[in-house]
Amino acid sequence: MSGSPATSNLEREAKLQAPAGFRLPELGGDGLVASDRERKRLVTVYVDTPDLRIVRWGCSLRHRQGEGWTVKLPSGGNGSQLVRTEVNFEGEDARKLPTAAADLLRAYVRDAELGPVARLRTIRRGVEITDEGGTPLAVVTDDEVSVMDGRRVASRFRELEVELEPAGDANVADELVRRLEDAGAGPVDNVPKLVRALGPRAASPPDVQVPEVTEEASVIQVVRLELATSVVRLFHHDPGVRRGDDPEDVHQARVATRRLRSALRTFRDVLEPSWAASLRDALRWLADDLGAVRDAEVLLDRIRSREPLLPERDRQSLKDLLETLEDTR
């Protein structure tokens, strides 16, 4: 494995299926300007564990020829849009997974092996949507996807995407989706390509689930609820802790760790002693590391708050200090 610099962005899109014979409608008009993009041929390899842990958690790890590696992490959504954080890594070789990309998914993967699980060939036609002043609002893509089994095409499907640009809003997406649906597409299902390619196994629940309990729940059911709730919370915020972009991820990971430790104390009489002791030791180590990160965040916030009070001649030195501290977090 090799390391590489990463860039990230927030991806907001709606996905629809296109039936046989579907033709893209006119997407311009009423304040929107449409222009065709050059057709592309894409070759994409998806990497996952044998039991598909990554995609079952709503994430993905892929290599695309000419584009490098991409990790996608769920960031919520409002039903009509699929919202994910997209983290991109350099790397021309699909056999050399960047260490930093694998690390982002470590909580979901843990000690499982990673390997190719799907290879897709896609013919992509795109339409760029701008306002009348030329500001990019969205891109509509029409993908004809072939799922490969060696050199053989195992299956095919066609997918439409409406992806918003930073200046685009939900109204733009809804209008474009409406035009596509009126032309015979849809409805919006927001099923990722890998799930569509691999089928039900990729859409099955993740390996840790928060169980539903009733008022008549047994002690064991309550224990499972408490532990699973905190584990899921910790998993969801682990990539953000590793990226270091948002202090809230560190805070939420600390909350999850504290609650796990509290649950181990509260339910110690019904837990297997050696298992609980091993988990307590690991959580103690994790809590110490997260505490150190949080302390660094607090220190940085305090230093930043002093900047307006400093004379102009000292502000560059403060900026240099902040950069050094941020690089060593």
Image (spheres, helix red, strand yellow):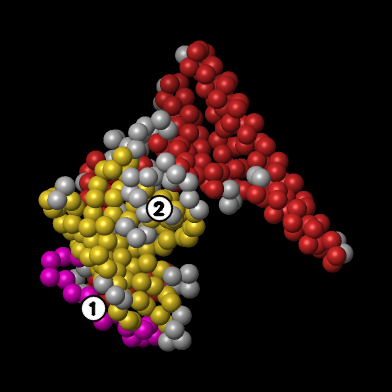
In reply to whether residue 26 is colored magenta, the answer given is yes
Asked whether the residues under the numbered discs 2 and 1 touch, taking CB atoms below 8 Å apart as contact, a structural biologist would say no
* Camera sees residue 77: no
Vertical order, 263 against 104 (above or below): above
Q: Mark 2 points at which residue?
A: 91
Query: In x, y percent, where is residue 260?
Result: 54, 29
Q: The residue under label 2 is which amino acid type?
A: Gly
Residue 79: image tag: none
- Locate the N terminus by quadrant: top left
Q: Residue at 14% of width from left, 51% of height from top? A: 151
Q: Residue at 37% of width from left, 78% of height from top? A: 129
Which residues make up the magenta segment?
17-33
* Camera sees residue 7: yes
- Locate the C terminus by quadrant: top right
Secondary element at image label 2: loop
Q: Residue at 42% of width from left, 33% of height from top? A: 110
Q: Relative to 196, is 277 on the left or the right?
A: right
Q: The residue under label 1 is which amino acid type?
A: Pro
The tag earlier along the polypeptide, 2 or 1, is 1
In reply to whether residue 23 is colored magenta, the answer given is yes
Vertical order, 39 against 16 (above or below): below
Q: Name the residue under label 1.
A: 25
Query: In x, y percent, where is residue 141?
Result: 29, 69
Query: In x, y percent, where is residue 244?
Result: 58, 48
Picture quadrant where residue 82 is located: bottom left
Total marks shown come to 2
Picture quadrant where residue 13 is located: bottom left
Secondary element at image label 1: loop
Query: In x, y percent, where is residue 319?
Result: 75, 59
What is the magenta segment's predominant secondary structure? Answer: loop
Vertical order, 297 against 274 (above or below): below
